[in-house]
Image (tube, rainbow, N blue to C red):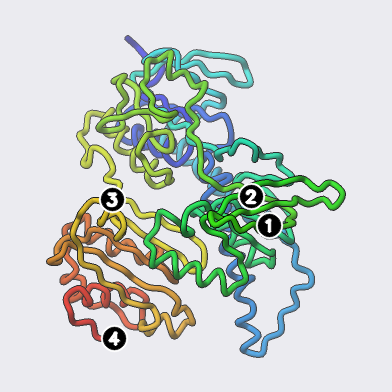
């Protein structure tokens, strides 16, 4: 049968557009269907604009360091709208860049909403009506949206999602963030840096509950010193819009029964994301799902051989842009007749970053997970305060932590809190993926003074010969 395309991708986020471009590079006639802006959530209301705002927040927050040099900073004319505009410019620039890359690689971009009709066909509703498109293979990459908590639905004014948060042209004077995961902590960092009073409520026993306990302790101490109020083992038990005062009266209740009454301008609900799998025709095409996520096997192939699924919609896959991109490459290569290795991404080899200050970065097992799985391990911790570069640039808050087997060997996990963590983690990840063991890192010459010396010293701790502690 002659199809319109060899590969049809539904969604142009970091998974979808990468999959389409990779398929085209491998000689396949490819198309992408996108109902919104090219680049999906990540480029438009996620990773890119948030990091643009974080960058400016850190510049603004660190203006106090200029005072130590005798420089007076007059910030009376500061307007957050300028920060917002810069973030939108970054998003628009990269969205246009992706459109260019699709065109350069001869990937057809189709504006509209796609719905699967069968194993090799999708209907697309666009400005010109509905059309049916056939393809030899279909890659579903529809992404996710902020999760709604019953009773705490978004109204776009007083109760906001993470998407809403990035589209604010003014910041509240007082805010309550529900959820202390990566998104919640990043936005708390933004608000606090620009002078907002910030409260965070988290149901787990600690902030960043998926991260290493020693790492999260570093972040909590830092945020507490900055004046952020953190309530762990706590929930938002009630809230009421106070129309007279244009605010929200909220009660945060701890597991111990202690109640804290707050009056804030806005509540930001940042408690995770929900896969966009409803109404996209999975049932019609016969694709299996579990709890709203699509089930996949090797090469991200569903139970229907011609249909693949990547990114946030895939069960057991971390909801991270770089995971979606790599999965898109793997799927496209398999469709093109390759047998890419690995057939699926190893979740223990995926870096996870939180771009607050101090940054956190990690991969692999934490101590808790290793213990829960009865995996024996040895750990090494090297503090940033013993790293010359960290002290020199006034960034001595943090640590590098490495876990290996009890007798050394392969790295089981690595966890970093501190300046440059998002870049430093990749040396340790490369070592794990390549089978390089910590003694080799310990012997490698690292430039001085650099933050990477903290990685070297952590490796030396494991061998029992660290120089600087």
Q: Which of 379/426 is in front?
A: 379
**Which residue position holds label 4?**
468
Q: CA distance from mark 2 to mark 1?
A: 7 Å
Q: CA distance from mark 4 to mark 3?
A: 30 Å
Q: CA distance from mark 1 to mark 4?
A: 42 Å
Nearer the observer: mark 2 or 4; the answer is 2
Q: Secondary structure at mark 1?
A: strand
Q: Which of 252/460 is in front?
A: 252
Q: Please report whichever mark, 2 or 3, sits nearer to the chain's N-terminal start.
A: 2
* Residue 51 can be seen, yes or no: no
Q: Please report whichever mark, 2 or 1, sits nearer to the chain's N-terminal start.
A: 1
Give the class, few, some or many, for how many residues have Cα within 10 Å of label 2's Cα (few <14, many ≥20).
many
**Which residue position holds label 3?**
348
**Which residue position holds label 1?**
175
Query: Which residue is pictured at 72% across the width and 60% down the height?
Result: 174
Q: Secondary structure at mark 2?
A: strand
Q: Is residue 195 left or right of residue 19?
A: right
**Which residue position holds label 2?**
268
Horizontal and vertical percent position of residue 198: 65, 62
């Amino acid at each position: 049968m002659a199809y319109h395309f060899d590969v049809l991708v539904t969604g142009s986020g970091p998974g979808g557009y990468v999959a389409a471009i990779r398929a085209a590079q491998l000689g396949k006639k490819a198309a992408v269907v996108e109902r919104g802006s090219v680049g999906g959530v990540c480029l438009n209301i996620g990773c890119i604009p948030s990091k643009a705002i974080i960058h400016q927040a850190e510049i603004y927050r660190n203006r106090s360091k200029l005072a130590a040099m005798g420089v007076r900073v007059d910030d009376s004319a500061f307007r957050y709208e300028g920060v917002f505009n810069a973030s939108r410019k970054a998003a628009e620039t990269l969205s246009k860049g992706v459109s260019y890359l699709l065109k350069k690689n001869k990937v057809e971009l189709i504006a509209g909403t796609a719905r699967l009709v069968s194993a090799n066909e999708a209907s697309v509703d666009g400005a010109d009506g509905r059309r049916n498109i056939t393809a030899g293979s279909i890659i579903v990459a529809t992404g996710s949206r902020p999760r709604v908590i019953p009773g705490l639905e978004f109204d776009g004014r007083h109760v906001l999602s993470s998407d809403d948060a990035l589209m604010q042209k003014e910041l509240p004077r007082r805010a309550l963030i529900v959820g202390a995961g990566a998104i919640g902590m990043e936005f708390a960092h933004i608000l606090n840096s620009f002078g907002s009073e910030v409260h965070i409520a988290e149901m787990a026993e600690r902030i960043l509950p998926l991260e290493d306990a020693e790492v999260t302790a570093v972040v909590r101490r830092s945020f507490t010193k900055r004046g952020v109020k953190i309530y762990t083992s706590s929930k938002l038990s009630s809230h009421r819009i106070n129309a007279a005062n244009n605010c929200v009266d909220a009660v945060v209740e701890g597991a111990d029964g202690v109640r804290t009454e707050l009056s804030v301008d806005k509540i930001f609900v940042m408690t995770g994301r929900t896969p966009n799998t409803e109404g996209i025709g999975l049932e019609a095409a016969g694709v299996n799902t579990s709890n709203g996520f699509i089930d996949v096997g090797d090469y991200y192939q569903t139970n229907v051989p011609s249909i693949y699924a990547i990114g946030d919609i895939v069960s057991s896959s971390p909801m991270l842009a770089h995971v979606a991109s790599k999965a898109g490459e793997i799927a496209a290569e398999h469709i093109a007749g390759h047998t890419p290795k690995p057939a699926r991404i190893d979740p223990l080899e995926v870096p996870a970053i939180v771009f607050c200050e101090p940054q956190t970065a990690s991969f692999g097992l934490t101590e808790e997970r290793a213990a829960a799985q009865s995996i024996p391990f040895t750990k090494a911790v090297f503090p940033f305060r013993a790293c010359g570069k960290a002290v020199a640039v006034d960034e001595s808050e943090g640590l590098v932590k490495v876990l290996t087997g009890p007798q050394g060997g392969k790295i089981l996990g690595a966890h970093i809190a501190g300046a440059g963590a998002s870049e430093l983690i990749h040396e340790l990840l490369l070592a794990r993926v390549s089978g390089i063991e910590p003694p080799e890192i310990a012997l490698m010459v690292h430039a001085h003074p650099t933050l990477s010396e903290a990685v070297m010293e952590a490796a030396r701790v494991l061998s029992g010969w660290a120089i600087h502690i």
